[in-house]
Image: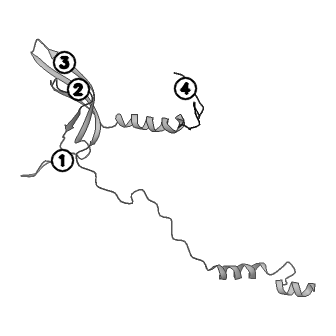
Amino acid sequence: MVKSHTSNIHDTAPTISDKHTTQKAISQRQLLSVGQLELNVPGNSALQAGDIITFDMPIMQPTGHKKEIVSSPFWAGRYLIYEMKHIVDRSKDTYSMILKCCKDNVAKSYVAEYNSWTHSAPRRKTYNIYETDKEIITRMGTNAQGLTTGQHKAFRT
């Protein structure tokens, strides 16, 4: 595939270069490899690649008497079927499918983590610029001979 490296193709309208879109494309492709399922299910010829299915998986914890089974917040949810294989076994008279699915979204939204990625700098000391100015003038006012700025002016005149 041949692609031009100029940003002005056929007109003066600039286009977005590959260096700005390639990273996003790679990131989106990598998202498909996170949260994948491979399911061996009974045959259903109505399903096809591109369909959305709902998957529910209980959280792996012991349940006590009369406690409700809780779905896993990370694995339960919607999945996109991106590959499927139909298996027809005539000797056993069975029809099954192998579905390969990638995560679309979670069943229930995650708990919000407010300020989880913020960083606050330590509080800075406030300065009075007039006092700081006086301090600097006082420190710098003495020259190498030990005379203050005012004395030095009087000495010169």
The quadrant in which residue 74 appears is top left
Mark 3 or mark 2: name the one nearer the start of the chain: 2
Determine whether the residue tagged by mark 2 lies in a helix, strand or loop: loop
Mark 1 = which residue?
61
Please say whether residue 148 is visible from this viewpoint. no
Mark 3 = which residue?
87
The residue mark sitting in front, 1 or 4, is 4
Mark 2 = which residue?
48
Q: Amino acid at mark 2?
A: Gln
The residue mark sitting in front, 3 or 1, is 3
Give the distance between the C-alpha atoms of the residues marked 3 and 4, in whole angstroms: 42 Å
**Residue 14, placed above or below residue 108:** above
In the image, 30 versus 144, the foreground residue is: 30
Mark 3 or mark 4: name the one nearer the start of the chain: 4
Is the C terminus in the top left, top right, bottom left or bottom right quadrant?
bottom right
Q: Amino acid at mark 4?
A: Lys
In the image, 26 versus 59, the foreground residue is: 26
Q: Where residue 48 sits in the image (x, y, percent)?
A: 23, 26
Determine whether the residue tagged by mark 1 lies in a helix, strand or loop: loop
Mark 1 or mark 4: name the one nearer the start of the chain: 4
**Residue 90, placed above or below residue 40:** above
The quadrant in which residue 45 appears is top left
